[in-house]
Image (cartoon, rainbow, N blue to C red):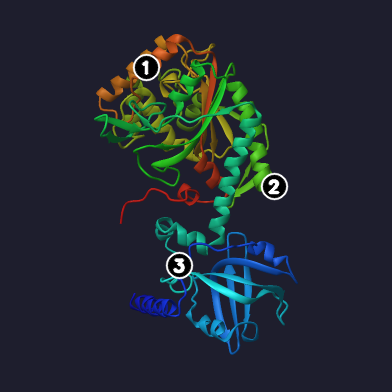
Amino acid sequence: MAQIDEIIQNRLEKLKKIREIGWDPYASTYEKKHTISESLTSEGKIVKTAGKITSLRTHGDITFADIKDESERMQVFFRKEDLSEDLYNHLELLDIGDYIGVEGVVGKTKSGEISIIPTKYTLLTKSLRPLPKEWYGLKDVETRYRKRYLDLLINEDTQKVFATRAQIIKLFRNILDRSGFFEVETPVLQPIYGGATAQPFVTHHNALDHDFYLRISDELYLKRLIVAGYEKVYEISKVFRNEGLSRWHSSEFTMLEFYWAYADYEDLMKFTEKMLTEIVQEVKGSMKILYEEQEIDFAPPWPRVSYVELFKEHLNIDLNEIDNEKKLLHIVEERKLLDEKVVGYGHILDRVYKSHIRPKLVGPMFLTDHPVDLKPLAKRRNDDPTKSAGFQLLVLGAELINAYNELNDPVDQRKRWENEVDVGERGGEEHQVMDEDYIEALEYGMPPTAGWGMGIDRFAALLTDQHSIKDAILFPTLRPE
């Protein structure tokens, strides 16, 4: 630390000298006419570009520097014969990390490297702190998350991850737009949270003197728009869930949800296969990807697996017989399947499934036939009212997509939420709540509708081979230092 302080002090002394010679160390603007990428292909031409110094070395009457912008990196070849005496001598005031503008002809050095040979340069921003790569490296994972700006500056692999993430979002938006979906925005602050089973964050609105919730989902507002007469709507939104963190979970994450009137979950499965395979092919150039050295083949069709059959296969539990909370609790306690108390039939099933079954699944696979208690907002199957009409898409033990036929019967919806409220009253930590306004909306009539939701961060982490979704979120939620 003492050595870093010494470097900072040295740069502060340079800053003082810079001001003394009349330079502005923090310029307001610069006419950057060319990107560095363009400059690299402009041999024999005069360019005017700018970037951050990433290396700097002097050999007598010549000084080499590398500068980098968001497009590329390029060498700058300062020669004493091309610059005024003052300009060349003042190169000693520059450091790695400074931003400079340079103007000159593009040529080749004796070693054959394409370089800018400046006749003038301008200091644009003086850096006071050494870059980690220059001094102590940036290897600690949490430091990379907390100081993502340094991670992006130094690690080109990190830059590629977020370029791919942006590409994925753009591809989703393009596909939905050309498929006739209408992009909308719904409230982040909600008087009643809903649309998922999760604990919310609470905030207080001073002017209204009322508590509001950060949304855990945008589902109920998007379905209000279906009630309003829209037939295809989607939103790419930030959602917030006050829950534990893991490699697949973040308290703040990006959700893509869309709702499609007159479609059912069978239509959604076909659409999902078509949309995701197009994106995987575009991003990866193949239907096969490697994730942590494990191959995943997205070539359709993807198998469909019954939730009920998985319980039979992995735990020898027949959910057609073990169909209530009392029976299920007896088995869970007898076989010690959970080490915590969970309330509610669907909630207990979910914990058992996530603990003992889902980690063993590779996929991609469509998981269907969830018991209705697991899906309070989903319609029942016509041929089996105990099962929900929907699916989840699973890949490597993680849920990528949750989709189902939307429950548009207001009487049934009220009963489902009453069951959820009962779970909460009996001590369940996570449960859905009653939303009278939404039920009133359903009473005006919502056409048959299918809905679909995906956590963008998980999908981006998967396609960029990142162990944790934090590596696919620019500024993930962390414990304050």
Could you tell me how many numbered marks the image carries? 3
Mark 2 to mark 1 CA distance (whole Å)? 46 Å
- What residue is rendered at 31% in x and 37% in y? 339
Q: Earlier in the sequence, mark 2 or mark 3?
A: 3
Query: SS for tag 1?
Result: helix
Nearer-N-terminus badge (2/1) = 2
Which residue is tagged 2? 285
User: Is there any visible trace of residue 465 in the rendered image?
Assistant: no
Gap between marks 1 and 3, in whole Å? 54 Å
The kind of residue on which mark 1 rests is Asp
Tell me the kind of residue under disc 2.
Gly
The spot of residue 120 in percent (x, y) is 60, 76
Depth check, mark 2 against mark 1: the one in front is 1
Q: Is label 2 in a helix, a strand or a loop?
A: loop
Q: Disc 3 residue type?
A: Tyr
Q: In the rendering, at what x and y percent does residue 102 appear?
A: 60, 71
Question: Do the residues under discs 2 and 3 have CB atoms within 8 angstroms?
Answer: no
Nearer the observer, 245 or 439: 439
Disc 1 target residue? 437
Of badges 1 and 3, nearer the viewer stands 3
Image coords of residue 247 (percent x, y)? 44, 47
